Image (spheres, grey):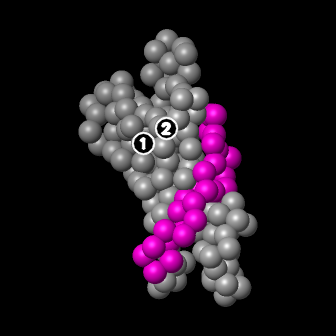
Amino acid sequence: MRIFKVNKAINVVCNAESSRNGFNHVCTLMVNGRDRESVKVHYINRTWESYEFETALKKLLDKTTSLNANGKKAFAGMIKNGGEAEKKEFESSMRTISAVASMGELFGQTKKEKNDWKARMIKAGLGNRGLQMPEDWDELSEDEKERRLNNVIKQLKG
């Protein structure tokens, strides 16, 4: 669940929920703490949004009859700025994953131990964001693994 604050009186509560053949994003407009309107966007696989819930928020803004012109303007501004806040949060999490993975250089004694640490931390940080290790990963030399992992770490730093 994520709550987007528009102003003192207006919030939007968004949830992701599983469905039989994908998942849904459901956003509910709250005015003075009361439910006013909701929208649902169904996805079969994944979203291509600038930030999570963006499509559902835009749909709710287009649909709403509960807000006056000023409320809609504030809502539209929140949607625009919501992407910036999400982007900063995403970049921060990528830098954190990079820093933790880099610690493999300190914790490992051998190149294999260092590579194993880096790969484990990158998988832990990016596994639910679409990361897939190459099918031949276990067959690669430790030098090649090190080169690839260090490139990933460099990209995560930004």
- Residue 75 at x, y = what percent? 63, 76
- Quarter of the image for residue 110 reads top left
Horizontal side of 59 relative to 122 (left or right) equals right
Task: Name the residue rendered at 49%, 83% in the picture.
Answer: 9
For mark 1, what is the residue? 125
Three-letter amino acid code at disc 1?
A: Gly
Image: magenta residue range: 27-56
Q: Nearer the viewer, mark 1 or mark 2?
A: 2
Task: Name the residue rendered at 45%, 60% in the picture.
Answer: 2
Whether residue 87 can be seen here: no
The C terminus - image quarter:
bottom right
Q: Quick check: 40 above or below 31?
A: above
The N terminus - image quarter:
bottom left
Q: Magenta span has 42?
A: yes
Q: Magenta span has 150?
A: no
Who comes first in sequence, dot 1 or dot 2?
2
Q: Determine the secondary structure under disc 2.
A: strand
Horizontal side of 67 relative to 91 (left or right) equals right
Q: Residues within 10 Å of mark 1 (few under 14, many from 20)?
A: some
Three-letter amino acid code at disc 2?
A: Ser
Q: Quick check: 56 above or below 65?
A: above
Q: Determine the secondary structure under disc 1.
A: helix
- Residue 53 at x, y = what percent? 58, 56
Q: Quick check: 89 above or below 156?
A: below
Near-viewer residue (113 or 52):
52
For mark 2, what is the residue? 18
Q: Residues within 10 Å of mark 2 (few under 14, many from 20)?
A: few
